[in-house]
């Protein structure tokens, strides 16, 4: 055992024995190094180890604190994996899978609060680029995307050890736009797609619109059911797969590295196109960011899709795709359906990345987000029924909550009358297995007010209503 691991184990022993209670503050790094007679590097590694294990969390500008810990929740999954195609349009909620209240409320849409975004820095960049905008804004944009942005993204992700060239990338109008183009390139209406279960509600709405059928592949905290996925491939039950692999929405988990490698191998073995929706890739709650399955894709069967919508500015509608061997049909379809992406927006984001502001923002937001998720979890632990199960995400913006015997459809309806938005479990599947679950956005600071109501206030109403529904 290394010195930092030994130091981390000392804290774990104190937390388990409750000598360090939940919420207690730990020594600052410099103080810890002096107390223990170790270097700052060793102290920092010890705290990193504790954060990755979920024992502590960092609160920006405040220090390190003991996190609330509970056994890994055994969330429901499909009782019996049903590898038969289903038409999502036949099982959609009345207003669609991704339906929410008109207007924005903090618990519903997966989104960072504007207060956490680099508004001043981004505004300066936009003004600077706009002042020197050339005649290029008066002509149609490059179909593949502005070269400076593609190069900026290539250099940016290289710092995370995910290497690709600017020539391999196509800029789109969002991650969902990338997914749409990919689906239309590799499948036809009526085809069947393998998807994660539970599956992000926006993807189910998209698949409904595109008239694709689906087979849901169970995902638990141990990862995806690779046997079921391979069965779909080997028996030619599907024409493609649409999977999330990092900080999955709504579970918040990341598939183990071995499973990501296996997904890339299965794609090559069965020559199966796999669309990887990786919009939360950069929102890890820890310093070490996992790599996408695309990293291990040597044959080009994975189409990797992402965007700045969750990390920076959803209103700019800018995303990208690495289409691999499907580059030519992807680019052709993109040119036929959108004629490219706003050149000025692309130039602004390229500048924002190249000047270092985007990297700085990502480094700043990750510990803030980790702290917020811990605060939301602790709040729910204090106010929900003891039977409630709350996810412990490794990244991303959302919590997945299960309350046995809860009718989350009724809960959403009652909360809607109070102007409070959530995503109920039935929005994430064509099966009824998640009807006692709900998803909560943690992207807003708990006590930041919006329309005279904070997330904490809305969570109190939510917890009270859950109690009433269970009692009745």
Image: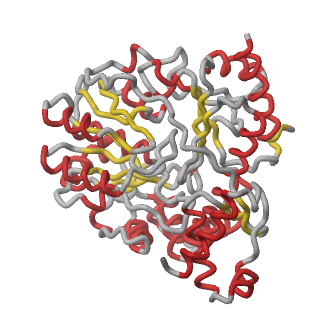
Viewer-proximal residue, 452 or 435? 435
Residue found at x 49% / y 52%: 280
421 relative position to 99: left or right: right
72 relative position to 335: left or right: right
Viewer-proximal residue, 8 or 280? 8
- The image quadrant of residue 82 is top left
Q: How was the colour assigned to the protein in this rendering?
A: secondary structure
Q: How many marks?
A: 0
Image location (x, y in percent) of residue 48: 58, 70
Image location (x, y in percent) of residue 407: 61, 17
Image location (x, y in percent) of residue 449: 83, 44
Viewer-proximal residue, 298 or 35? 35
Residue found at x 43% / y 74%: 159
413 relative position to 161: left or right: right
Whether residue 97 can be seen here:
yes
Viewer-proximal residue, 117 or 315? 117
Q: Quadrant of the C terminus?
A: top right
In the image, farthest residue toward the top = 472
Image location (x, y in percent) of residue 377: 68, 44
39 relative position to 135: left or right: right
Residue 105 to residue 137: above or below:
above
Residue found at x 37% / y 72%: 161
Residue 83 to residue 90: above or below:
below
In the image, farthest residue toward the front = 17
Residue 428 to residue 375: above or below:
above
Whether residue 143 can be seen here:
no
């Amino acid at each position: 055992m290394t010195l930092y691991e030994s130091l981390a184990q000392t804290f774990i022993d104190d937390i388990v024995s409750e000598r360090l209670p939940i919420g207690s503050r730990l020594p600052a790094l410099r103080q810890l190094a002096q107390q223990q007679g170790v270097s700052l590097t060793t102290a920092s590694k010890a705290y990193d180890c504790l954060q990755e294990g979920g024992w502590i969390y960092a609160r920006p500008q405040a220090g390190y604190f003991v996190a609330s810990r509970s056994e890994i929740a055994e969330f429901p999954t499909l009782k019996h994996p049903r590898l038969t195609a289903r038409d999502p349009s036949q099982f959609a909620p009345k207003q669609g899978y991704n339906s929410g209240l008109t207007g924005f409320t903090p618990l519903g849409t997966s989104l960072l609060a504007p207060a956490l975004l680099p508004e001043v820095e981004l505004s300066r960049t936009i003004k600077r680029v706009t002042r020197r905008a050339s005649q290029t804004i008066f002509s149609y944009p490059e179909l593949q995307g502005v070269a400076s942005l593609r190069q900026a993204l290539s250099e940016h992700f290289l710092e995370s050890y995910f290497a690709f060239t600017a020539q391999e990338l196509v800029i789109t109008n969002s991650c969902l736009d990338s997914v749409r183009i990919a689906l239309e390139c590799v499948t036809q209406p009526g085809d069947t797609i393998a998807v994660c279960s539970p599956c992000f509600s926006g993807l189910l709405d998209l698949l409904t619109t595109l008239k694709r059928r689906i087979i849901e592949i169970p995902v638990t905290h141990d990862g995806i059911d690779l046997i079921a996925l391979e069965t779909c491939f080997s028996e030619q039950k599907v024409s493609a797969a649409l999977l999330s692999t990092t900080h999955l929405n709504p579970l918040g988990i990341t598939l183990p590295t071995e499973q990501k490698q296996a997904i890339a191998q299965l794609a090559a073995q069965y020559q199966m196109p796999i669309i990887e929706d990786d919009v939360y890739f950069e929102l890890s709650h820890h310093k070490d960011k996992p790599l996408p399955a695309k990293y291990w894709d040597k044959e080009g069967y994975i189409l990797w899709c992402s965007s700045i919508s969750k990390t920076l500015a959803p209103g700019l509608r800018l995303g990208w795709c690495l289409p691999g061997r499907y580059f030519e049909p992807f680019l052709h379809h993109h040119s036929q359906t959108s004629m490219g992406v706003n050149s000025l927006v692309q130039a602004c984001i390229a500048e924002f990345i190249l000047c270092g502001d985007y990297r700085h923002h990502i480094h700043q937001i990750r510990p803030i987000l980790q702290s917020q998720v811990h605060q939301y979890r602790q709040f729910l632990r204090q106010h929900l029924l003891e039977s409630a199960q709350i996810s412990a995400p490794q990244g991303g913006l959302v919590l997945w909550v299960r309350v046995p015997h809860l009718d989350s459809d009724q809960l959403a309806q009652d909360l809607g009358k109070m102007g409070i938005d959530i995503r109920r479990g039935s929005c994430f599947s064509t099966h009824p297995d998640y009807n006692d679950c709900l998803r909560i956005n943690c992207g807003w600071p708990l006590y930041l007010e919006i329309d005279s109501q904070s997330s904490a206030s809305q969570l109190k109403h939510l917890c009270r209503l859950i109690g009433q529904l269970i009692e009745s």
